[in-house]
């Protein structure tokens, strides 16, 4: 947690050294400790409290490769085979592990990354595949399920946070309807801030016609009237309404996080000039400030024709952006607390069609996990020589989600309750892939 984070995003300049303050990150700035404070510090030695603090410091950046990236041109190349295509494989920083030659930077950083090469998710259409890989399970008609970002927001958020809990960049038009994200039964607090037209949110700035003093006084008046109205009343809707207003000023103050103009030119050059690179840089700024989950989507990987030209462009960009993110997080001391996930709705067919493209393929494809809680340099699962089937370690979406939660220190079998019905974070019986966990 950075010093800038502590100074800019603590819950209040007036709070004392409390458990809430510790979770908010402000306790580290306390200069004098009272006897009561020392008693509280003793509580930090309690295993349950220490574990909660540890979990609350975790963050996730999801790089969503919308349309379905090819595993054969990324993490599971098959050079020299009829299905292999024109690109070679190259040796990585991990002896014996190779990736596509289109990823030379990621190859040299693979000691931070785990590759899973054995997904069989069965759903080969964009809408169904994207829904499955957002929810970790098949949807239910009678129950609106939360997606990964909403669940991470719920588990890792701080109640006093002034920054958004879940931000979702999707500025392309292709596949956008499948990538919106939903908080489901977890409620609006965990719904994504969905950005489709720009890197910056709309309507977040204070109107120039309203001065800062007027804005503060209006807020104070609303708080006063709300407290008076709440006397003698108990209502979850009223509490939710007040909480939403309480977050407004904090969200407005987070506007600068979306502005990369203050970043050193050397950092901007590292990420590259593309929108994907810029939004990934914003994602780093957000998680550094305390946002639990940021999703950055890059479309459109649906290469039914000219697969190799498409992947030359998109994988080369991913190589630059992802490696820049890994280096940036590591240099800032954030990589051990941030999980970077690359994920699609499915992979691409090993067979090459008549348009020199690869079609939808959910039977044997790959993802990567980097950073927090991950055994860097590990590879799990195996496909056959042509990449047609999984021959070792077959996994589904539930196991991927269980692994993500476990890397973050979250019990993936924890249950939410909708009325009397328990709903675990992942499907019952699913297990995390221990081989890729640190």
Image (cartoon, grey):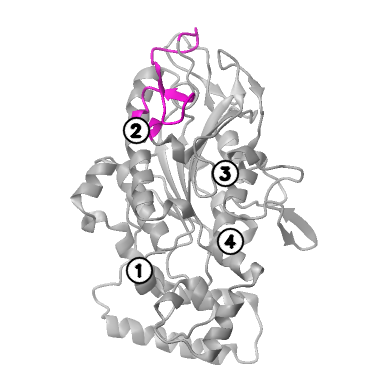
Left-right relation of 52 to 330: right
Sequence-wise first label, 3 or 1: 1
Residue that label 1 marks = 3
Q: Secondary structure at mark 2?
A: helix
Sequence-wise, the earlier of marks 4 and 2 is: 2
Q: Is residue 80 visible?
A: yes
Q: CA distance from mark 3 to mark 4?
A: 15 Å
Query: In the picture, residue 217 is in which quadrant?
Result: bottom left
Task: Tell me where the magenta segment starts and ends, as one range.
Answer: 80-108
> Secondary structure of the magenta portion, mostly?
loop
Q: Residues within 10 Å of mark 2 (few under 14, many from 20)?
A: some
For the residues labelled 3 and 1, the Cα–Cα distance comes to 33 Å
> In this picture, is 267 found above or below 312?
below
- Give the residue pinned by disc 3: 134
Marks 3 and 4: which is nearer the front? 4
Q: Which mark is residue 154?
A: 4
Q: Secondary structure at mark 4?
A: helix
Label drawn at residue 105:
2
């Amino acid at each position: 947690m950075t010093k800038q984070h502590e100074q800019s995003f603590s819950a209040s300049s007036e709070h004392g050294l409390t458990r809430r303050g510790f979770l908010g990150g402000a306790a580290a700035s306390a200069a004098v400790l009272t006897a009561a404070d020392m008693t509280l510090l003793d509580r930090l030695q309690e295993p349950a409290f220490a574990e909660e603090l540890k979990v609350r410091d975790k963050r996730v950046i999801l790089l969503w490769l919308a349309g379905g990236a090819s595993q054969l041109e990324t993490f599971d190349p098959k050079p020299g085979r009829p299905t292999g295509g024109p690109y070679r494989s190259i040796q990585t920083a991990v002896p014996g592990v190779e990736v596509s030659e289109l990823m030379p930077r990621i190859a040299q950083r693979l000691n931070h990354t785990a590759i899973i090469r054995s997904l069989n998710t069965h759903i080969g259409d964009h809408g169904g595949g994207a829904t499955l890989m957002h929810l970790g399970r098949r949807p239910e008609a009678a129950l609106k399920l939360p997606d990964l970002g909403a669940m991470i927001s719920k588990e890792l958020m701080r109640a006093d946070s002034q920054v958004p809990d879940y931000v979702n960049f999707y500025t392309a038009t292709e596949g956008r309807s499948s990538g919106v994200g939903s908080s489901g039964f977890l409620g609006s607090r965990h719904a994504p801030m969905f950005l489709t037209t720009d890197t910056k949110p709309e309507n977040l700035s204070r109107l120039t016609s309203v001065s800062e003093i007027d804005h503060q006084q209006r807020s104070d008046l609303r708080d006063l009237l709300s407290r008076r109205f709440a006397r003698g009343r108990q209502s979850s809707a009223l509490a939710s309404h007040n909480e939403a207003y309480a977050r407004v000023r904090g969200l407005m103050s987070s506007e600068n996080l979306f502005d990369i103009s203050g970043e050193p030119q050397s950092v901007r050059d590292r990420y590259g000039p593309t929108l994907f690179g810029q939004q990934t840089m914003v994602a780093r700024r957000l998680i550094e400030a305390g946002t639990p989950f940021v999703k950055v989507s890059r479309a459109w990987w649906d290469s039914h024709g000219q697969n190799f030209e498409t992947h030359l462009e998109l994988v080369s960009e991913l190589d630059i952006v992802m490696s820049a993110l890994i280096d940036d997080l590591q240099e800032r001391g954030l990589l051990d607390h941030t999980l970077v996930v690359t994920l699609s709705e499915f992979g691409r067919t090993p067979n090459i069609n008549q348009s020199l493209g690869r079609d939808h393929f959910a039977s044997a494809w790959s993802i990567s996990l980097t950073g927090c809680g991950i055994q860097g340099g590990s590879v799990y699962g195996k496909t056959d020589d042509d990449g047609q089937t999984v021959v070792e370690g077959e996994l589904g979406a539930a196991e991927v989600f269980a692994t993500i939660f476990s890397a973050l220190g979250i019990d993936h079998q924890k249950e939410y309750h909708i009325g009397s019905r328990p709903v675990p974070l992942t499907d019952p019986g699913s297990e995390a892939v221990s081989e890729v966990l640190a």
